[in-house]
Image: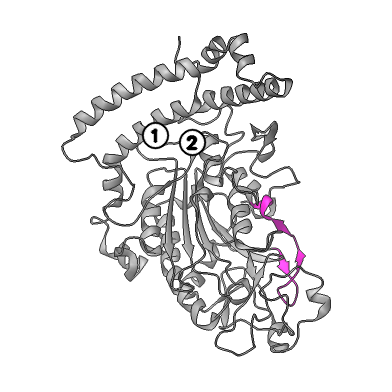
Amino acid sequence: MNPSAPLGDRLHHLTRRTFLGGSARGVGGIALGTLLTSTLARAAQVAGGAKGRPGLPHFKPTAKRVLCLFQSGGLSHVDLFDDKPMLHRHAGQEIPASVKGDQRLTGMTSNQSAYPVVPPLSPGKRCGPQGTWISDLLPNLQTVAGDLCIIRSLHTEAINHDPAITYMNTGSQQPGYASMGAWASYGLGSENENLPAFVVMVSQGTGKNPGQPIFSRLWGSGFLPASHQGVGLRAGANPVLYLNNPPGVDRAQRRALLDDLAELNHRRAAELGDAETLARIDAYEMAFRMQASVPELTDISREPASTLEAYGPEVRKPGTYAANCLLARRLLERDVRFVQLFHRGWDQHIAITRQLPNQCRDVDQPTTALLKDLKQRGLLEDTLVVFATEFGRTVFSQGKLGDPGMGRDHHGRAFTVWLAGGGVRGGIDHGATDDFCYNITEKPVHLRDLHATILHCLGIDHARFTTKFRGLNVRLTGVEEAKVVRDILA
């Protein structure tokens, strides 16, 4: 039997008697068995493939890799990117009913007796060639406004954290779907055999602490082969759990053990056509290579002092956002396909006047240093940087106006993200909101459109990039309409 052809072996062993006996002796069981067999066959054909899917990319990409800087908790677009004169004229007054409309609110504000308008907490300035407004809470980011494509008209149906962050990262509000990075790995494979195609890091900010929980399913592979799920890098001496050899086992012994184990697993895969067995072989081999590559990756001792200084004082502290930004650059220059940082603490329901400035200090200098670092090294032109969050915040206060405990609630009807590099036009604003930063007035962008645009920059037509799941041709952008935001492309 040929281990590289698990489908044929699976069908060979799946005799009529075995198949009927294992399919619950019924027509429904036969149909289920057929569905499972076809799903297994497709998965087996692609499991472990470092080269991606045949025929991809569909066209010449503008980005080879993606960096997603995910600000978990719901960044306040009102305070940081979308000031309007009307907010100051109506400060403390009730938001007009014609603006608020019948929007669905969370249980945290739906019973408030008043909804007074709160202008941005800090002044800002017009920056870059487009004259875009950026808060003085982000003074370093103001200096690179000419590289940013700021989308002010993103929107989502989700109003609570878990469905919203799941939606933004997987294209579905329901758990179990494949993440953006897993889709990129599945479609395009890896260009570095010693590191995973998809790497994730998580940091806790100094805004809301602890921030909203981050679950590993946000970088999971869902229904795609397990080899495409994200690999988390942790802070400290062991960035990847269980990577080190146990005491008494050297590298040569580990190699011999893996060779024997691979032979057994290939035999098992040949017998059953089990795609997860093939993925397990790849996982063992990747772990062996990472034993050498990860220590070199995380050793920043040879970084110039000027580089470390640019990222800020937290860069030497493993697990901080600054340290993760530097590691992200090191991963990208090693051609890791998709790198994602999750930074917790943006959920300013309370004490926003204290929490938001702290959270901004976490990200402002490191994010700006990372952009400049990528640009200086010639990496920004083919790296798509996405600075995203799950939704925005309300223009009205949560809690009593002027109270130290005042905050802002969730707002998915209109919020801001920005992109840079990788074929996206820098120095532009796209879309607009009304005078209260509440409703979209120009060029709405659904998060499905954002996903379609990310794939487009990678050379992938989202409508043709599908896989079978539960009898459907499933794609990252879902079954509803999604379009590439072509106005922002270079």
Task: Indicate the amino acid at tag 1.
Answer: Ala
Q: Mark 1 — residue?
A: 283
Image point (80%, 75%), residue name = 99
Q: In which quarter of the image is the N terminus?
A: top left
Image point (30%, 52%), residue name = 298
Q: Does the magenta stretch include residue 240?
A: no
Q: How crowded is mark 2: few (under 14 residues within 10 Å), some or many (20 or more)?
A: many
Question: Quick one: 433 or 403, which is closer to the camera?
Answer: 403
Q: Where is residue 163 in the image (x, y as percent from the top left)?
A: 63, 56
Q: Mark 2 — residue?
A: 226
Q: Does the magenta stretch include residue 446?
A: yes
Instruction: Say whether marks 2 and 1 touch (CB < 8 Å).
Output: yes
Q: Where is residue 276 in the image (x, y as percent from the top left)?
A: 48, 29
Residue 252 appears in which quarter of the rendering?
top left
Q: Give the range drawn in magenta.
A: 431-450
- Asked if residue 48 shows in the view, the reply is no
Image point (57%, 13%), residue name = 14
- Of the numbered discs 2 and 1, the one sitting upstream in the chain is 2
Helix, strand, or loop for circle 1?
helix
- Asked if residue 439 shows in the view, the reply is yes
Task: Indicate the amino acid at tag 2.
Answer: Ala
Label 2 to label 1: alpha-carbon separation: 9 Å
**Above/below status of 5 relative to 125:** above
Helix, strand, or loop for circle 2?
helix
Residue 157 appears in which quarter of the rendering?
bottom right
**Above/below status of 344 relative to 374:** below
